[in-house]
Image (cartoon, helix red, strand yellow):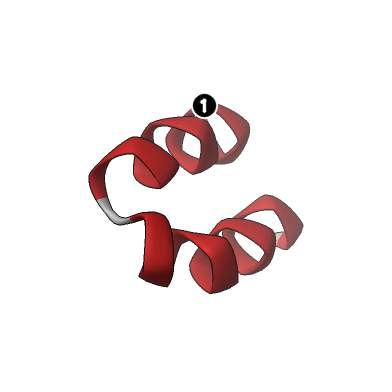
Amino acid sequence: VARRSGRGYKSSKSIKATKGFEQTDLE
């Protein structure tokens, strides 16, 4: 689910997603 969320996050928050995206993938 983390991988899928990461992609969707980029669409919603491109700025915060960039940093949270990588962290979410790790978790």
- Image-based side of 23 in relation to 7, left or right: right
Q: Residue lying farthest left?
A: 12
Q: Residue lying farthest right?
A: 26
Q: Quadrant of the C terminus?
A: bottom right
Above or below, 1 against 16 in this view is: above
Relative depth, front residue between 19 and 26: 19
> What residue is shown with label 1?
4
Say which amino acid is labelled 1: Arg
- Image-based side of 25 in relation to 20, left or right: right
Residue under the image location 33 percent in, 37 percent down = 11
Residue 4: give x, y in percent of width and height. Answer: 52, 26
Residue under the image location 39 percent in, 55 percent down = 14
Q: Quadrant of residue 2?
A: top right
Question: Could you classify mark 1 by the number of other residues whose Cα lies within 10 Å: few (under 14), some (14-19), or many (20 or more)?
Answer: few
Residue under the image location 24 percent in, 44 percent down = 12
Residue 5: give x, y in percent of width and height. Answer: 44, 36
Q: Quadrant of residue 22?
A: bottom right
Relative depth, front residue between 2 and 11: 11
Secondary structure of the residue carrying tag 1 is helix
Residue 9: give x, y in percent of width and height. Answer: 37, 44
Q: Quadrant of residue 3?
A: top right
Above or below, 15 against 2 in this view is: below
Total numbered labels: 1
